[in-house]
Image: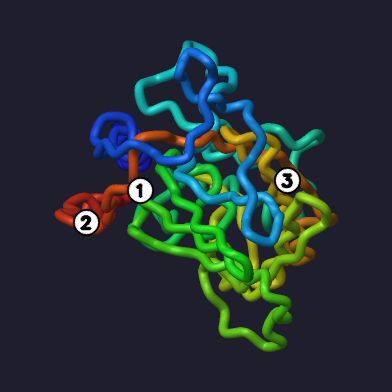
């Protein structure tokens, strides 16, 4: 098996088979005692929807031809453009780069090198993430590389000249019950998916996050990156709550033995 897919397989094995069990408090129940995932979303003290919880990508989507392998991951993790009508509006160099990265079997993929993977791929990678939501701040803790992201909702502006980072800088405001997140300040070299579709330091990413019920988060992503794409483009993602479980460490470099063999001939 090529190492890139081995990574995906191991990633899936962690939440599916090795999560530690801890009853989730505050879960709404149906009359027969089962979790009521369609119940109204909980609220923060300021009345806004509370996005807190442990979440996973939505696995309830069509399998690829031939059926779902054991390590099956969401389509967008493999190909971010899977649900984008008409495909991605590439700048020519970006299309060529994606093809080159695929041909080279992802030897330069940050994921293959255990590096951070950026906020878009963090939404699609099949590992758990925990949201801690309080007035003024939404923090996301990821199993992947035991990493974190901060989204500030306290009214602060984005930095004018930020130091480029893997996750950029995120601020947000509410539009009704939807949290609108604006992120800028990315570094170059981030991949959007395992095909190697790029995002550059010119990118501005908008996320519209809502919780229509207790059991689901919905995220509408818009990527505006004039260096890599001729126009902004958007996609929709879902995440499902995970009950009676919690995060485990997943440190990609721990006992890592494959990088020396990641060679394309």
Residue 260, which numbered label? Answer: 2
Q: Nearer the viewer, mark 3 or mark 2?
A: 3
SS state under label 1: loop
Q: Which label's residue is closer to the chain start, 3 or 2?
A: 3
Name the residue furthest front: 31
* Labels 1 and 3 touching (C-beta < 8 A): no
Residue depicted at x 47% and y 40%: 26
Q: Position of residue 14 (x, y in %)?
A: 29, 38
Measure the C-alpha gap from mark 1 to mark 2.
Answer: 12 Å
Q: Which label's residue is closer to the chain start, 1 or 3?
A: 3
Q: Is residue 15 above or below residue 65?
A: below
Q: In this rendering, does residue 122 appear at all?
A: yes
Residue 160, which numbered label? Answer: none
Q: Nearer the viewer, mark 1 or mark 2?
A: 2
On the image, which quarter does residue 170 sit in? bottom right
Q: Which residue is mark 3?
A: 220
């Amino acid at each position: 098996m090529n190492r890139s897919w081995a990574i995906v397989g191991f990633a899936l094995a962690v939440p599916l088979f090795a999560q530690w069990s801890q009853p989730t408090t505050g879960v709404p129940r149906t009359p027969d005692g089962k979790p009521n995932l369609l119940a109204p979303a909980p609220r923060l003290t300021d009345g806004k929807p509370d996005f807190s919880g442990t979440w996973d990508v939505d696995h309830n989507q069509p399998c690829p031809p031939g059926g779902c392998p054991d390590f099956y991951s969401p389509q967008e993790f493999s190909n971010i453009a899977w649900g984008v009508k008409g495909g991605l509006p590439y700048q020519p160099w970006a299309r060529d780069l994606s093809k080159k990265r695929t041909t080279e079997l992802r030897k330069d993929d940050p994921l293959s090198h255990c590096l951070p993977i950026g906020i878009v791929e963090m939404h699609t990678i099949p590992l758990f993430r925990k949201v801690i939501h309080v007035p003024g701040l939404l923090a996301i803790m990821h199993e992947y590389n035991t990493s974190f992201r901060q989204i500030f909702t306290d009214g602060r502006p984005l930095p004018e000249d930020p130091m480029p980072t893997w996750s950029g800088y995120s601020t947000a405001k509410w539009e009704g019950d939807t949290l609108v997140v604006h992120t800028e300040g990315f570094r170059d070299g981030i991949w959007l998916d395992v095909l190697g579709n790029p995002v550059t330091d010119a990118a501005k990413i908008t996320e519209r996050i809502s919780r229509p019920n207790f059991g689901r988060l919905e995220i509408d992503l818009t990527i505006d990156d004039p260096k890599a794409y001729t126009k902004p483009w958007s996609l929709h993602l879902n995440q499902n709550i995970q009950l009676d479980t919690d995060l485990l460490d997943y440190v990609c470099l721990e006992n890592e033995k494959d990088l020396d063999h990641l060679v394309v001939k």
